[in-house]
Amino acid sequence: MTDAQLLLQITLAALFFIIAIATDLRSHRIPNALSLAAIFCGFAINGYYAQLNGLLLASFGFALAFIILFPVFIFRLLGAGDIKLMMGIGALMGPELLAWSLLYGVAAGAVTSVLLVLWRTGLSGVVNTLKRYWDCIYCRTYFKPEPNEAAGQKVPYAPALAIGWLVACSINYDLPSVYLQLSHYLG
């Protein structure tokens, strides 16, 4: 992989994540056009720079994101937009960086979800959720969460996935030369 290819991939992935975060925080949706653009760019860039091997790498990254995240979608833990975005990131960056990004993204998601829910509902929202859980257990029936509860909040996950990607990129051994090249162009 050349430095130019890696720099282009990182720049595009960062751009896709910035747009995804903005739309996810505003409307709780990630546009299909954004995900399709990421998928197309992933296959185009990898195919251009590494021909058949690049297309295979993009295919493996794309497929790995689907294989890992589709069961998560079935259980309604992630939205379809998050999955399609990560399929695009997998096609763009390849399966290895995708796997690490998802691992770190899950850890970041635990923290960002709790912080976002606490910010929206406060401690009273968490207490209301715990009370509802107790009522569900005591009455042996399920009660839907109220909008003012912690469990009733929709949490955008694009920020957590972006944090996971940033952490994965920061510890990738191929990237210091790209950062050095970028700082040379900017400074």
Image (cartoon, rainbow, N blue to C red):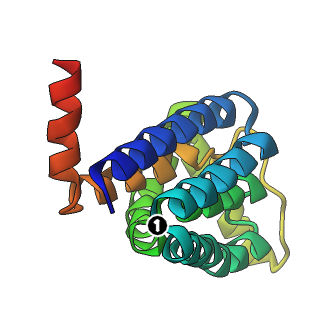
The residue shown at (71%, 58%) is: 84
Along the viewing direction, whichever of 175 and 32 lies nearer the viewer: 175
The spot of residue 181 in percent (x, y) is 19, 37
Image height check: is 124 above or below 142?
A: above
On the picture, is 20 further left or further right than 7? Answer: right
Which of the 4 image quarters holds residue 70?
Answer: bottom right
On the picture, is 178 further left or further right than 80? Answer: left
**Total numbered labels:** 1
Q: Which residue is mark 1?
A: 50
Image height check: is 68 above or below 100?
A: below
What amino acid is labelled 1 in the image?
A: Ala
Q: Residues within 10 Å of mark 1 (few under 14, many from 20)?
A: some
The residue sitting at the top extreme is: 187
The answer to whether residue 23 shows anywhere in this view is: yes
Along the viewing direction, whichever of 31 and 71 lies nearer the viewer: 31
The residue shown at (51%, 70%) is: 54
The residue shown at (61%, 50%) is: 41
Q: The residue tagged with tag 1: helix, strand or loop?
A: helix
